[in-house]
Amino acid sequence: RRRTTIVHTPRGDLRTTDEWEEGIRTSWYPEPLIKDTDDAERFLSIPYEFKPPDLSGMEEAREQAGERGLTQAHVSTPMVCVSRMIHFDQFLEWCAGEFELIDRMVATVQERTRDVLDYVMGHGGGPMVWFGGSEQATPPMMSPRLYDALVAKYDAPLFDVVHEHGGLVHVHCHGKVSGILDRLVERGVDALDPVEPPPQGDIEMGQAKQRVDGNITLMGNVEFCDLEFAEPDEIERQVERAICDGGKKYMMLYPSATGITDVTERYRDNAMRYIEAGLQYGAM
C-alpha cells in the first residue's frame, strides 16, 4: 500500500509518500517530505496555532492498565521529528553542512512539542513519558558534540515539563549509549531502554548499573535477534546476567525490540523461556 500526502505551505506544496507491505508491521517513506533547503524553508513557513489534543482515550487506557501497569505518552525527540522528514543520509550531511538550518527546524519542533506536552501533562497525562529515537545522534552516526547540540539541548526543557507535572521521563535509545549515560543522569532521566550489550551496543547491563548508581532505572538487555535465533538455554543465561549482574534494583527486564512479522516457533519458545527466567531470577 502507498499513501501520498500533500502539505500546503505559504511558500508552496510539500509532498511525501509512505509504504506498507502485507504482513509486515512497519512502514517506509521512499519520498521524504523535505528534499532540499527550499523545502526546509517551506516547512518553516507553516503558520503555527496551538490546538489542544483530544485526550478522551487517556482515562480509558489508565483503566485498562489498572493496578498492574503504568500508562505513558509517546514523544519523538524533536531531532527525530526533523530527521524523519529527510532521507537520513542527507540529514547527516546537513548536520555538518547546513547546521543552522537543521538547528532552526529542531528548535521549531521543540517549541510546538513543548506546548502539547505541557497541556497533556497538565490534564493528567503520564505518569510516564517515553522519548524515542535519540540513537540517531549516538556513535557511529554523530559525535558527542552534535548529540549535545541537537538532542540534549532540546530534550532537556521537555524533560523539565514532565518533572514539573510530577511525571517520569523514559528515554529510548538503541546502540552505543556508554558515552551519554552521564548526560542522561545529569538531565534527570528516570528510565532508559534497551541498554544493548556488544556488538549492537557497547555496554553490559552490570556495567551500566554501576555507572548510573541507581539514578536511572535501566531496561534491557536481551536482543531481539537472540530471541529470534538463539537457543532457549542461551536466552536464560542472558536473562540471568541482565538481572543479576550489578544488583537487581533499578532494573527492568526488557527486549531490545518486538517482532514486526508473524512469530516463529523458535521465537515462541525463547519468549516463554525469557518470561520463566525473568520470574525465576527477578524475585527479590
Image: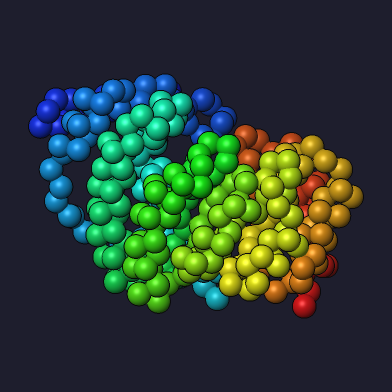
Residue 165 appears at what percent x and percent y?
A: 35, 74
Viewport quadrant of the N terminus:
top left
Residue 172 appears at what percent x and percent y?
A: 53, 53
Question: In the image shown, does 72 or 256 lie closer to the viewer?
Answer: 256
Q: Residue most toward the left?
A: 10
Q: How many marks?
A: 0
Task: Please determine whether, in this image, residue 154 is positioned above or below residue 210.
Answer: above
The image quadrant of residue 91 is top left
Residue 257 appears at what percent x and percent y?
A: 62, 46
Task: Please determine whether, in this image, residue 168 is positioned above or below residue 82.
Answer: below
At a point 28% along the width and 65% down the height, the residue shown is: 118
Q: Residue most toward the right?
A: 233
The image quadrant of residue 51 is bottom left
Image side of residue 75 versus residue 213, left or right: left
At a point 50% along the width and 39% down the height, the residue shown is: 142
Question: In the image shown, does 165 or 178 lie closer to the viewer?
Answer: 178
Viewport quadrant of the C terminus:
bottom right
Question: In the image shown, does 135 or 167 lie closer to the viewer?
Answer: 135
Tell me, what colour scheme is on the image? rainbow
Image side of residue 40 versus residue 219, left or right: left
Q: Is residue 263 visible?
A: yes
Image side of residue 177 versus residue 156, left or right: right
Q: Is residue 133 visible?
A: no
At a point 80% along the width and 65% down the height, the residue shown is: 245
At a point 46% along the width and 46% down the height, the residue shown is: 145
Residue 152 appears at what percent x and percent y?
A: 43, 55
Task: Please determine whether, in this image, residue 231 is positioned above or below residue 167.
Answer: above
